[in-house]
Image (cartoon, rainbow, N blue to C red):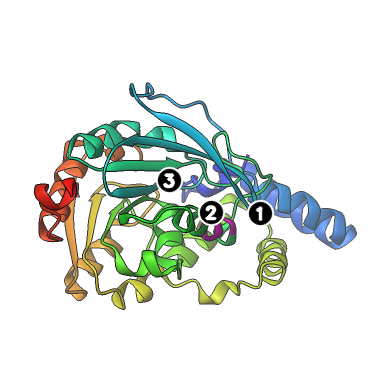
Amino acid sequence: MSDKIYFNTSQRFNFRRSLINIGTRVHHKVAPRHARNIARKLFLTPARTPGKNTMPQGMQLDSISSAHGELKTYRLGAGPVWVLNHGWSGSANQFFPLMEHIAEQGFTALAYDQPAHGKSGGAYGHIPAFVAGLETILDSESDVVGIVAHSMGTASTIECKHVTAQQVPMLLIAPVLDYLENLFDSVRRSGYSMKLFEEVVEEVSCEYHYPIHTIEPYNKLKLRQPLTHIVHDKDDKFAKFSVSERAAQEIDKVDLVMTQGLGHGRIMKSAPVKQSFDALVELSGMTVSSRCN
């Protein structure tokens, strides 16, 4: 259900949206606790869509315990590890084609389903859970040399304070660098009561001691020292290309590759992403010989 909120880009007047706005405001006024419970389920429940990509031969499946439930992991290849972090209502399956490429270059590709996504446990998804999920994965690996992330996964990767996340290069695909603006605009377009949404946000912030105003991917990207490559489609309807473009212009350690016609999802298995991975590996000094040692 939440996909219809977060991935709704229509700006036009919509009678149904007006009814939703009136209905949720009345519900909130008449039965505030019940309205918050319903809204929490609505806003924090991602869609678990079946994966479209075929699992590569040699993929190793496992799971690891986290504070938000069991995380399903997918490992392919041998050598130093690149961790892959998907976005909202996504799954590790979206990375399978890229994982094959990473493994062919002499690395281990390690993807996982975030809490409440794919085949992982957990009922709710949100930034605190995404950050905790990535931290759990990084704690379990001793040889991580880079991170690939898509959409909301990019925001949680930049937000992550784990020492490994701070020190390795990143490949960001269709990043949401203006996370808060993107989130609130999406809910506003849906017609749902903003007051009700803000109360849910406050509940989650207090529950996980993660104040929402501290979520600033763009500003935190400015502070990173390792290289960051961004691949973003000019016509992306869900994450603003203009923000990625500005980041590449303002931040020395950020490089941008623009695509067109690939959108927000198909870009994940595109040639430009694979080429950008190769370029990031080369610029980061990960030579063939060092990968094999």
Is residue 131 part of the magenta span, yes or no? yes
Task: Give residue 138's position: percent from left, percent from top.
Answer: 44, 57
Quadrant where the N terminus is found in the figure? top right
Region of the chain picked out in magenta, as a range: 129-133
Chain-order first, disc 2 or disc 3: 3
Residue 53 location, quadrant = top left
- Alpha-carbon neighbours of circle 1 within 10 Å: few (<14), some, or many (≥20)? many
Give the residue number, with chain letter if any, for mark 2: 133
Task: Give residue 133's position: percent from left, percent from top.
Answer: 53, 54
x 26%, y 44%: residue: 79
Give the residue number, with chain letter if any, for mark 1: 192
Distance from Cα at disc 2 to Cα at disc 3: 11 Å
Observer-side mark, 2 or 3, equals 2
Q: Amino acid at mark 3?
A: His
Chain-order first, disc 3 or disc 1: 3
x 10%, y 49%: residue: 289
Q: Amino acid at mark 1?
A: Tyr
x 40%, y 49%: residue: 238
Q: In the rendered image of this protein, does residue 160 appear above or below residue 102?
A: below
* Position of residue 93 in the picture relative to residue 127 (left or right): left
Residue 60 visible here:
yes
Q: Are marks 2 and 1 in contact (CB under 8 Å)?
A: no
Question: Camera-side residue: 216 or 107?
Answer: 107
Task: Give residue 205's position: percent from left, percent from top.
Answer: 66, 69
Q: Amino acid at mark 2?
A: Gly
Distance from Cα at disc 2 to Cα at disc 1: 28 Å
Q: In the rendered image of this protein, does residue 134 appear above or below residue 3?
A: below
- Alpha-carbon neighbours of circle 3 within 10 Å: few (<14), some, or many (≥20)? many
